[in-house]
Image (cartoon, rainbow, N blue to C red):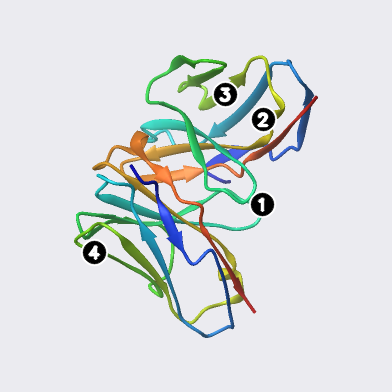
Amino acid sequence: QKEVEQDPGPLSVPEGAIVSLNCTYSNSAFQYFMWYRQYSRKGPELLMYTYSSGNKEDGRFTAQVDKSSKYISLFIRDSQPSDSATYLCAMGRNEKLTFGTGTRLTIIP
Amino acid sequence: ETGVTQSPTHLIKTRGQQVTLRCSSQSGHNTVSWYQQALGQGPQFIFQYYREEENGRGNFPPRFSGLQFPNYSSELNVNALELDDSALYLCASSLGLEQETQYFGPGTRLLVL
């Protein structure tokens, strides 16, 4: 079993829809949780960082962490075609980050 | 403020050869981490350098080695290349050990034939 599980998709939604992306994990020692966005042929770009259970909001993005269920989510409101990318969840303990496989998202105009 | 840069952008090698990849960290950052991203997969942590010392390593064999220089730039060396080493190699720099300040470079795409 992988430490971090993420549905690779692909996921296609119409413009303006709410997108929900999810990851589960098995290692309860993870200390912090992150979401990255990666466009084709680019490096990952940090979207959200949190280290506690609960919700964290930044503009159209909301990150949710449930440590008791070992489950994290990223919600994108009012999705735009420019949100089309691969979204990677990542979890860390000390210096080591463990990534999910990424979910490829396409927003259809 | 300059971002993280990596060189070369693309590289083709043959099995058994050695390769050196380079990374310049973002201005003010003193920590560099290296990741391997195979096609269709998430990045995998190779190792991290903090103030010129290795600060942690993932599950990669010793033929993957690294170096960090006094200006905090870094090199990743891979010896005895194997076909499975074909991947995008990403470098990320951060301020100290604060992962939330980590910024990735565009990567070096390595193809081993």
Which residue type does callout 1 highlight?
Gly
Find residue B36 and report its horizontal and vertical position in percent. Answer: 50, 58
- Tell me the quadrant of the picture where the C terminus of chain B can be found: bottom right
N-terminal of the pair, mark 2 or mark 3, is 3
Disc 1 designates what residue? B40
Report in which chain the residue with disc 4 lies. B
Secondary structure at badge 4 equals: loop
Find residue B20 and report its horizontal and vertical position in percent. Answer: 42, 73
Do callouts 4 and 3 mark residues in contact (Cβ within 8 Å)?
no
Q: Residue at x 35, y 40 (%)?
A: A93
Q: Residue furthest front?
A: B1
Disc 2 designates what residue? A82
Report in which chain the residue with disc 2 lies. A
Front position among marks 2 and 4: 2
Which residue type does callout 3 highlight?
Ser
- Tell me the quadrant of the picture where the N terminus of chain B can be found: top left
Distance from disc 4 to disc 1, alpha carbons, whole Å, reads 32 Å
N-terminal of the pair, mark 4 or mark 1, is 1
Q: Residue at x 65, y 56 (%)?
A: B39
Disc 4 designates what residue? B69
Do callouts 2 and 1 mark residues in contact (Cβ within 8 Å)?
no
Distance from disc 1 to disc 3, alpha carbons, whole Å, reads 20 Å
Q: Are marks 2 and 3 on the same chain?
A: yes
Secondary structure at badge 2 equals: helix
Disc 3 designates what residue? A73
Image mark for residue B91:
none
